[in-house]
Image (cartoon, rainbow, N blue to C red):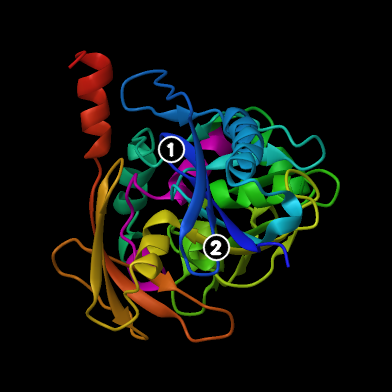
């Protein structure tokens, strides 16, 4: 019998990787490609999602070649992604309306200040567990709707779709304009400021506060189920898992018991602690979040502490100071 492996796409802040794992959990091949960071003005950080898609299209066959395998050897594909990075695109053409706004971008400070000044802070904290901040995807989506020509009108007609990076990649992999599946996983949805962290559904109150049309939002699904089947890159292979990158690390580091924690060092450094089936609240600025949901099982929550600049600071020393 030919070898069966699982393919993982790690769509990160600075690069995209494809990793192949065998049944024993051993990595047998990897291919990686960096993408460009766009800094149009101070405080703004953007990615070209078409470039990221082209990178994915090239690295998946490269990983297969290195392992001496073909698409028929892939049992399933899973995706981990840089969280909170926000993209909108046309459902019919598949083209993004603008470059993606990354999680590091702070242009939404005015929107966040307005939400706080209007007294919405307690609403967001109680419903989604997050205080309004430039860190999350919802204010970015509001900025795009307000500033990209045709975005709001298209969203209200159902022609413009929103997603974080796993949503964009799943949609493209499963057909794009020709019937692509428009879904997000619960961990990424929990970082938008738009999801009720207890019901795991989009909150009408939060959508109203941010003035976001529900028609443009993906369906929220668990982290471990078949969302759809690839029609390109890996034709016939099911897309069967997705997690925000830090939640993927929580699972990958086997933090399955309450109190177990991990810290991973990438572009930023993120410590997540499993808090079990209850949502823990912090009086010290830590972020309650959905840790993971496996299929039909009950949600597992986590508490997160984040440092935005770690690996990216090393990269800045390398690229900007030439060290």
Near-viewer residue (158 or 99): 99
Q: Which residues are magenta?
A: 123-146
Mark 2: secondary structure: loop
**Label 1 with label 2: CB-CB less than 8 Å:** no
Q: Main secondary structure of the magenta part?
A: helix
Quarter of the image with the N terminus in it? bottom right
Residue 291 magenta:
no
Q: How many numbered marks are there?
A: 2
- In the displayed structure image, the side of residue 1 where residue 122 appears, left or right: left
- Disc number for residue 224: none
Residue 127 magenta:
yes
Looking at the image, residue 268 lies above or below residue 288: above
Q: Which residue is mark 2?
A: 22
Residue farthest along the left direction in this orientation: 284
Looking at the image, residue 22 lies above or below residue 92: below
Q: Which residue is mark 1?
A: 102
Residue depicted at x 50% and y 44%: 30
Residue farthest along the front direction in this orientation: 1
Q: Report the Cα–Cα distance between label 1 and label 2.
A: 32 Å
- In the displayed structure image, the side of residue 75 where residue 292 appears, left or right: left
Residue 84, x across and y down, in percent: 44, 49
Residue depicted at x 52% and y 47%: 29
Looking at the image, residue 277 lies above or below residue 66: below
Say which label, 1 or 2, has the lower sequence index.
2
Neighbor class of circle 1 (other Cα within 10 Å; few <14, some 14-19, many 20+) is many
Residue 268, x across and y down, in percent: 27, 44
Near-viewer residue (63 or 167): 63
């Amino acid at each position: 019998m030919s070898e069966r492996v699982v393919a993982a796409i790690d769509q990160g802040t600075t690069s995209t990787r494809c990793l192949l794992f065998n049944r024993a959990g051993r990595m047998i091949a990897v291919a990686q490609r960096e993408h460009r960071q766009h800094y149009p003005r101070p405080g703004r950080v953007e990615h070209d999602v078409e470039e990221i898609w082209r990178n994915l299209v090239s690295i998946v066959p490269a990983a297969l070649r290195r392992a001496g395998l073909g698409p028929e050897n892939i049992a399933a594909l899973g995706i981990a992604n840089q969280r909170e990075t926000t993209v909108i695109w046309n459902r019919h053409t598949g083209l993004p309306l603008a470059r993606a706004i990354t999680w590091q971008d702070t242009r939404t400070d005015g929107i966040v200040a307005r939400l706080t000044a209007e007294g919405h802070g307690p609403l967001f904290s109680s419903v989604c567990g997050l205080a309004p901040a430039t860190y999350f995807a919802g204010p970015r989506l509001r900025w795009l709707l307000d500033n990209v020509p045709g975005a709001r009108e298209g969203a209200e007609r159902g022609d413009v779709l929103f997603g974080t990076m796993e949503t964009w990649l799943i949609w493209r992999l499963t057909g794009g304009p020709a019937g692509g599946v428009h879904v997000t996983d619960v961990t990424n949805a929990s970082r938008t400021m738009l999801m009720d962290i207890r019901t795991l559904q989009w909150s009408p109150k939060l959508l109203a506060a941010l003035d976001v049309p529900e028609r443009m939002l993906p369906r929220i699904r668990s982290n471990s189920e078949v969302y759809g089947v690839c029609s390109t890159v890996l034709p016939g292979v099911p897309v069967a898992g997705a997690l925000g990158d830090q939640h993927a690390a929580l699972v990958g580091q086997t933090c399955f018991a309450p109190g177990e924690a991990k810290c991973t060092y990438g572009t930023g450094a993120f410590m997540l602690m499993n808090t079990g089936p209850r949502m823990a609240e912090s009086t010290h600025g830590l972020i309650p979040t959905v840790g993971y949901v496996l299929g039909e099982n009950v949600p597992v929550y986590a508490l997160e502490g984040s440092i935005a600049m770690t690996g990216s600071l090393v990269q800045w020393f390398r690229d900007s100071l030439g060290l």
